[in-house]
Amino acid sequence: MTQVINRILNKWIIGPFTKFIKTGLSPEKLARSFALGICLGTMPVPGSTITCTIAAIALKLNFGAIQLINYMVAPLQLLLIYPLFKAGAVLTGSQIMSGTLEELTKKFRLDAWGALMDMGNTALAAVLIWLLISIPVGFILYKISLPIFMRISHKNNAEDMV
């Protein structure tokens, strides 16, 4: 079992990042791309690809690395949407997330504009909650991943010299 997990980690996570390092990407920029890709990739509203692109351009990060991580965490984004929206509804006092899909559809039929505004306020609150969580998580991810990418970089530099 451990061999299977190691093989998956090496093929799908360590391997691609080793290739980024071999292209000359610094461990610092790779760690920033990694942390931002995870944080932005779990944003509870659509548009993480665009926000990752903007972050890569604005912060001069590796576009491929940040998008790779963004796509890798897409299942996590789907898992987090509901709890973040539920927390947003609690924060705003909204009832939009309570009940069944049929009841939600009925709310939209009765008052589409009101339901849309309620959903928008809930989404905004969900994004604010995500932001409050993702800032410290991003910092921690950066601090954890930097030594790992530095070790991979030093290992590759040592192999290149041999």
Image (tube, rainbow, N blue to C red):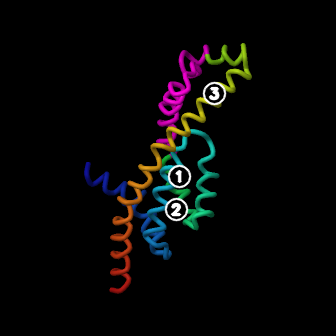
* Mark sitting earlier along the chain (2/3): 2
Residue 59 quadrant: bottom right
Write the start and end of the magenta stretch as one range. 74-103
- Which of discs 3 and 1 lies nearer the camera? The answer is 3
Q: Residue at x 54, y 43 (%)?
A: 43
Q: Are marks 3 and 1 in contact (CB under 8 Å)?
A: no
Residue 13, image x and y in percent?
41, 58
Q: Secondary structure at mark 2?
A: helix
Above or below 143: residue 90: above
Q: Residue at x 68, y 26 (%)?
A: 117
- Which of discs 2 and 3 lies nearer the camera? The answer is 3
Categorize mark 2 by other alpha carbons within 10 Å: few (<14), some (14-19), many (20+): many
Of the residues shown, which amino acid type is indicated by label 2?
A: Ala
Report the residue that reaches farthest toward the bottom.
161
Q: Which residue is mark 1?
A: 70
Of the residues shown, which amino acid type is indicated by label 1?
A: Asn
Of the residues shown, which amino acid type is indicated by label 3?
A: Met
Above or below 75: residue 119: above
Q: Nearer the viewer, residue 123 or 69?
A: 123
Q: Is residue 86 magenta?
A: yes
* Mark sitting earlier along the chain (3/1): 1
Q: Residue at x 48, y 47 (%)?
A: 73
